[in-house]
Amino acid sequence: MESKIKWGVVGPGKIARKFASDLQLVKDAILTGVGSRSLQRAQEFADEFEVPHVFGTYEELFQSPEVDVLYIATPHNFHKDLAIGAMENGKHVLCEKPLGISKAEVEEMVAASKRNNVFLMEAMWSRFNPTIQKVKQMIDDEELGELCYLHADFAFYALDRDEDSRLLNPELASGSVLDIGIYPIFLAYLLLGMPDKILATSNFHPNGTELQTSMIFDYDRAQAVLYSGLTSRSSMIAEVSCTKGELLLNSRWHEANGYRLVKEGEEQEVPMPLTGIGYYYEILEVNKCLKEEKIESDLWSHQNSLNLSELLDTVREKCGITFPFET
């Protein structure tokens, strides 16, 4: 019988619970460890998902022989140090997005992956979503002609959260852009590449947290209109408009379960049901890469994460989005 890849979770919060539920659906994966700064939180997670090895520090988890690969699901500002710490101990890493707060952080993380010859991937799970993979293939093959216009947004109401929460606390790299704006930016990058010019503007909370940001990515023959916000909901139907038709990714598009194809006045609904919540597909990719002894994915490479972090840096610079811990 084929041995299972042993996963550990760093930071047993809400996102980690979603991830763990999908991990249970992957036949060649098993969740064997969990680590937290709070042993009680780690134990509660372990009880919920039947995890045998529980650690009250991250370092103990990093050093454990009971895990092969770690899923890092802490707030953004801890990603770099935790990922590098894990890799320095020989662990493979799937790290929640954004991989780092800045391109400089991502460069450090990529260097650690290469130095230790271990796998590193940003958990840009939408890249592995079957609907998004299909849409990218159709655009690349120019099935609908040339892509000229893209619209994508991601927004929900978060102003009722505590100001110490991950979304509203500047010390935790708060705001919409890094947390959810990364998704529309990712889609534009995936389908259109690096833009020639970026226009962007933000509104802010009294404590300095960026609350909503509008962006235009300008290309030679196309434009992408993007938005992220914490002040209200949005439709989250992504529109991919080409010279000979358009594709509409079902809401919420970053976890789409199908799309609508509009061509020559006719509309076709194409359902593509998901297995699990959607994290399932990135787990399959990581396991595949580990079996092939790769240190990066061909579908979402180190360079892809570096490019995405560069786009985030540019948007932040244009909008004046900074965090207190940045020098």
Image: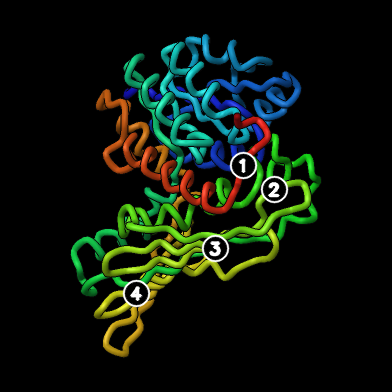
Sequence-wise, which precedes: disc 3 or disc 1? 3
Q: Residue at x 58, y 35 (%)?
A: 76
Residue behind mark 2: 209
> Residue 214 bears which disc, if any?
3
Quadrant containing the C terminus is top right
Tag in front: 3 or 1: 1
Q: Amino acid at mark 4?
A: Ser
Residue behind mark 1: 322
Q: Amino acid at mark 3?
A: Ser
Q: Residues within 10 Å of mark 3 (few under 14, many from 20)?
A: some
Report the Cα–Cα distance between label 3 and label 1.
17 Å
Quadrant containing the N terminus is top left
Q: Amino acid at mark 2?
A: Thr
Sequence-wise, which precedes: disc 4 or disc 3? 3
Q: Is residue 248 left or right of residue 19?
A: left
Q: Residue at x 75, y 41 (%)?
A: 165
